[in-house]
Image (cartoon, helix red, strand yellow):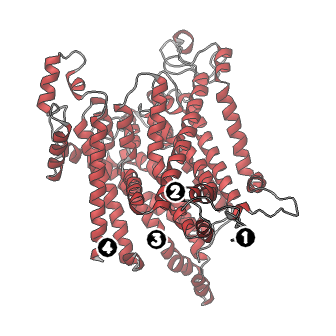
């Protein structure tokens, strides 16, 4: 029951607490699991290329203020005189607007850079939040069992049964907030809420399988408390799974944010997001192709890169590439 | 079997009840008061109070919840705040469009996905397979509305003026039904196709490595028969599961496709009701759609227990 009773070498030989933490000093220079995974990841050309593309997209987004400074066009400023032609139609790419102007005469390049920022921030934050919440709920449910498990598992089932897109727009719109920052937080929370359940379900299954393993019995026999087993033995064994799930959750969250913003239920105008740029351009893009092409391409590049990287991480962490055969 | 089914049924009812309660709570803690939405920004305090009274919003929350639950049990979803029409009538009017959209797309993507997946798995690691894998990745990475917009841009601009009008809300669905639905079907199906190709490919690769497939080959059966009879049949189980789940879930997530192509389905109904603050309609559609998700899951479960006796005991 108590967590003590360690270091009593005369009672029992000290067991390694979990398989990964073998205490024996390696005769050859050992590599950590992370190093092994990185070596494998580097051999995946698609994933490395995706990493490079993502890096470029990230730099482009990070330098958003620089683009605004260079062009002299802040993201929310309209330039009806230079950006629109005599008929009030947006002007295409040219010297003044490198990637064209939108229907209000705003600079598409600058807005796209800021929009990519929003997509990346919301996507990554929502995925991380969902990952933490899902891992916590899944571990707790799988490990505690009984009533806790029933309640948490039902909560996750219920979240998965909700028509998430409808409820998400409803939530995002009813809790309409005035400030742009709060809108961003709200959007992130809504996405995280609808993503955590799928996460939690997988983790719960993993924990249920881990619970029956010998090293957990060993830890229990050695007198570890439940909290200690969860933190020291179960969680480290979930690390690979959680990393893969999180990296694949990011593109999903980015797509979710774009969809919400496209429907006008995501970030608040005038703050640009790739989704809201596509939504606002919806009526004019038949004549102004760049309003569709620029944010669309950036969005696709970002999600595709994250998916390729996620697949790369999965292959790098997984046992020998393809999934194990069923026995 | 009846016992297993009964348990699943009971569980489904519980989930439905929880969802309805959750939606009720969400909408009643909303910081935007309903009477303000209906009365408009200039309504006097007196008008606001009258609206609250007529909607029963001045009662304690628990009383409101009781009334909501009691009516729900009788299948009454209430009336729209905006025009007083029964919510069930509104849904009945819009649901066919959404069901046609999802159903038509489902035919396309299930047939296409299984075919592509089988081709990809039987020609694993060829150029064919790599092309299919690339297609799957792009498909999985594309947000639905981007593909819909691209299709609309690519094809609707080529149409005449009348063609473009097909994708604006207005004329009833029956007019030019096929011409109007083709693009939405393709938009919805292409993305789902990616998921199904990947799923079928994975399942087929696993099944084709099984011993009984080797036995079938050793018996000298033609490869075609081995792949289709012995392989595909077993590989279809996870595909069918996913199909059931997706079919239910899609009824609630076609709002984007409906919006881009101007289709007046239930997705658009919610979208329009949110702007109008029409709470009963939002709750009504959400519950109806949830019913589809749960029913689909239930059918998949029951189907399983019929097909695979091991599920019944577990």
Which residue is pictured at 71% across the width and 67% down the height?
A14
Q: Which residue is mark 3?
A: B237
Say which residue appears at 30% left-offset and 43% top-offset. Answer: B23
Q: Quadrant of residue A171?
A: top left
Give the crowd class for mark 2: few <14, some 14-19, many >=20 residues within 10 Å: many
Residue situated in front as seen by the camera: A315 or A230? A230
Residue B192 in view, yes or no: no
Q: CA distance from mark 4 to mark 3?
A: 20 Å
Q: Nearer the viewer, residue B208 or A158?
A: A158
* Disc 2 and disc 4 on one polypeptide chain: no
Mark 1 closeness class: few <14, some 14–19, many ≥20 residues within 10 Å? few
Mark 2 to mark 1 CA distance (whole Å): 34 Å
Tell me which label, 2 or 1, sits earlier in the chain.
1
Q: Pointer 1: what residue?
A: A10
Discs 1/3, front:
1
Mark 2 lies on residue: A139
Q: Could you tell me how far apart the alpha carbons at marks 1 and 3 are, in whole angstroms?
A: 55 Å
Chain hosting mark 4: B
In this view, B17 is above or below A176: below
Confirm whether circles 4 and 3 share one chain: yes
Classify mark 3: residues with Cα within 10 Å, few (<14), some (14-19) or many (20+): some
Tell me where residue A327 sits by quadrant. Answer: bottom right
What residue sits right under mark 4 in the picture? B4
Q: Chain of mark 2?
A: A
Of all residues, the one furthest to the top in this rendering is A81
Outermost residue on the bottom side: it is: B219
Q: Is residue B81 left or right of residue A303?
A: left
Q: Are marks 1 and 3 in contact (CB under 8 Å)?
A: no
């Amino acid at each position: 029951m108590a967590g003590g009773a360690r270091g009593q070498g005369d009672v029992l030989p000290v067991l390694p607490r979990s398989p990964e933490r073998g205490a024996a000093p390696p005769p050859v220079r050992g590599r950590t699991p992370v190093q092994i995974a990185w070596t494998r990841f580097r051999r995946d050309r698609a994933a490395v290329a995706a990493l490079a593309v993502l890096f470029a997209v990230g730099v482009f987004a990070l330098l958003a203020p620089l683009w605004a400074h260079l062009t002299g066009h802040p993201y929310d400023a309209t330039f009806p005189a230079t950006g629109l032609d005599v008929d009030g139609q947006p002007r295409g790419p040219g010297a003044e607007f490198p990637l064209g102007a939108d229907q209000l005469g705003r600079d598409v390049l600058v807005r796209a850079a800021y929009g990519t920022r929003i997509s990346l921030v919301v996507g990554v934050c929502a995925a991380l939040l969902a990952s933490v919440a899902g891992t916590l709920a899944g571990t707790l449910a799988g490990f505690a069992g009984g009533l806790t498990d029933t309640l948490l598992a039902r909560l996750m089932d219920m979240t998965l049964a909700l028509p998430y897109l409808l409820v998400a727009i409803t939530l995002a719109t009813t809790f309409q907030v005035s400030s742009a920052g709060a809108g961003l937080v709200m959007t992130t929370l809504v996405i995280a809420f609808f993503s955590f359940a799928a996460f939690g379900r997988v983790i719960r299954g993993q924990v249920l399988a881990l619970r029956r393993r010998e090293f957990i019995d060993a830890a229990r026999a050695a007198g570890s408390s439940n909290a200690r087993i969860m933190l020291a033995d179960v969680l480290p064994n979930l690390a690979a799974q959680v990393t893969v799930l999180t990296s694949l959750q990011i593109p999903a969250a980015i797509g979710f944010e774009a969809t919400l913003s496209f429907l006008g239920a995501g970030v608040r105008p005038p703050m640009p997001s790739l989704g809201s740029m596509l939504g606002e351009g919806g009526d004019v893009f038949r004549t102004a192709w760049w309003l569709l092409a620029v944010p669309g391409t950036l969005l696709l590049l970002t999600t595709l890169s994250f998916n390729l990287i996620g697949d790369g991480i999965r292959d790098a962490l997984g046992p020998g590439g393809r999934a194990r055969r069923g026995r | 079997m009846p016992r297993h089914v009964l348990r699943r049924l009971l569980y489904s009812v519980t989930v439905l009840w929880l969802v309805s309660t959750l939606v009720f709570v969400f909408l009643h803690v909303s910081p935007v008061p309903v009477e303000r939405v209906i009365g408009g920004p200039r309504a006097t305090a007196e008008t606001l109070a009258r609206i609250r009274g007529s909607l029963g919003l001045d009662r304690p929350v628990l009383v409101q919840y009781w009334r909501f639950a009691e009516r729900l049990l009788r299948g009454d979803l209430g009336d729209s705040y905006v025009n007083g029409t029964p919510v069930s009538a509104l849904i009945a009017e819009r649901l066919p469009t959404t069901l046609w959209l999802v159903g038509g797309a489902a035919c396309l993507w299930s047939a296409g996905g299984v075919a592509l997946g089988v081709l990809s798995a039987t020609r694993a690691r060829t150029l064919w397979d790599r092309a299919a894998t690339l297609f799957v990745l792009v498909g999985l990475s594309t947000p639905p509305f981007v593909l819909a917009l691209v299709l609309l841009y690519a094809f609707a601009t080529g149409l005449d003026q009348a063609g473009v009008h097909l994708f604006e809300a207005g004329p009833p669905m029956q007019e030019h039904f096929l011409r109007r639905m083709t693009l939405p079907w393709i938009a919805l199906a292409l993305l789902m196709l990616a998921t199904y190709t990947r799923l079928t490919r994975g399942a087929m690769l696993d099944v084709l490595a099984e011993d009984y497939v080797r036995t079938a080959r050793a018996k000298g059966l033609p490869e075609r028969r081995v792949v289709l009879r012995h392989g595909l049949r077993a590989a279809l189980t996870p595909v069918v599961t996913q199909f059931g789940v997706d079919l239910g879930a899609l009824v609630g997530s076609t709002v984007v496709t409906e919006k881009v192509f101007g289709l007046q389905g239930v997705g658009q109904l919610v979208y329009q009701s949110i702007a109008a603050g029409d709470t009963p309609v939002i709750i009504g559609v959400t519950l109806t759609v949830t019913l589809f998700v749960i029913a689909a899951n239930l059918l998949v479960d029951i189907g399983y227990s019929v097909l695979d006796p091991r599920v019944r005991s577990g």
